[in-house]
Image (cartoon, rainbow, N blue to C red):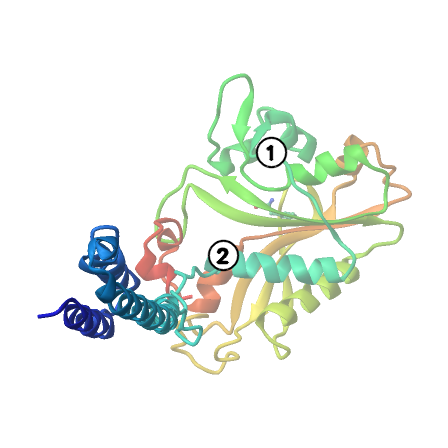
Amino acid sequence: MSVVERIEELKLEALSALAEAGTTKDLESVRVKYLGRSADLTEIKKSIRDLPQDERKAVGGSSNRATKEIEAALAERLAEVAVAEREEKLRAEAVDVTLPGAPYPKGSLHPSLRVIDEVVDFFVGLGYRVAEGPEVETDYYNFTALNIPPGHPARGMQDTFFLDDGLVLRTHTSPVQVRTMLSQEPPVYIVCPGRTYRRDSDPTHTPMFNQIEGLAVDKGLTLGDLKGTLAAMARHIFGEDVKVRLRPSYFQFVEPGVELDVSCFICGGSDPNCKVCKGAGWIEMLGAGMVDPAVLSEAGYDPEEYTGFAFGMGPDRMAMVRYGIPDLRLFFEGDLRFLQQF
Ligand code: PHE
């Protein structure tokens, strides 16, 4: 085989290798093999000067043409492969923005919190302010300032958790009314949601439970204002059709004291077997009354000038009634199967 034929053969080999190479890396190997420093074609070029004069021109010319042709084919293939590689990369890294997102585990509001939110929203809508106080209370705020002096038998009804140094876990949210009156001048319109504690545990009592206290002190407030305010609240929480009634009751810090019943919002009093009102037609809702003048005086307000009403309700109980939950203890066990129903 003549040198020129050999060059032709190498060129065809190189061109077909280029056609087959599918990646930039493969093309580079082909380049090294056919155009590199120790490639056969390179060797031939180096040996041209040793050839007889008459062959030099032919071999020189054909090796140069072969080199150019291979280089041109290489450049063309490199461009093609680069495009293909870019497309492949884009495809591999593509993000499908139409795929649905990973779902978030979503919680729900505790039934008590729903009622608390609704009650607080209602009073805030009337212009009441939200007030809070400590859950570890002094004996003074929890009892004495509320007209329950040391040794008074009314203290025994509260099933108090006593702590050291005259401290107690507050048995109701009423101490917040005293704290608020001591810290500001009348008029006062506050609503105080919070946790309260009593030594009690059965299907309708838990050692910790929620209360919402309300207090209004102003000039000329009457029992009529109390009833109207609470009736509006009951309609807001239980529906436009509910009626309310007051029954006489007793709490140390109010005079007169009342309990407020709401007409049964399930049966309206028409079903003797109603699970919610047990056929009574009425549901006990909350304790309330006109603030005892002794409590106003203790807080530095003049009972000749100001009157006020207070009320305290149990949002947990209200949620039990509203959602038909038979056991209050379920509220605080943290069982997801229970909580997920709301
Ligand atoms: N603090 C009382 C209780 O826990 C409820 C109440 C509040 C009654 C305000 C009257 C006025 O039982």
The amino acid type found where label 1 is placed reads: Pro
The amino acid type found where label 2 is placed reads: Ser
> Outermost residue, front direction?
53
- Image-based side of 123 in relation to 24, left or right: right
Q: Quadrant of residue 335?
A: bottom left
Looking at the picture, does residue 69 appear above or below residue 257?
below
| Residue at horizontal 64 percent and vertical 26 percent from the top | 140
In the image, which disc is placed on residue 112? 2
In the image, which disc is placed on residue 26? none
Residue 257 shows in this picture = no
Q: Mark 2: which secondary structure?
A: helix
| Residue at horizontal 27 percent and vertical 66 percent from the top | 63
Residue 7 shows in this picture = yes
Q: Earlier in the sequence, mark 2 or mark 1?
A: 2
Q: Residue 249: x percent and y percent?
A: 61, 52
Residue hosting label 1: 134
Mark 2 crowd level (few <14, some 14–19, many ≥20, 10 Å Cα): some
Q: Quadrant of residue 199?
A: top left
Q: Are marks 2 and 1 in contact (CB under 8 Å)?
A: no
> Outermost residue, bottom direction?
270
Image quadrant holding the N terminus, namely bottom left
Q: Nearer the viewer, residue 222 or 238?
A: 238
- Image-based side of 54 in relation to 154, left or right: left
| Residue at horizontal 35 percent and vertical 54 percent from the top | 330
Q: Residue 235: x percent and y percent?
A: 64, 72
> Outermost residue, top direction?
165
Looking at the picture, does residue 24 appear above or below residue 50?
below
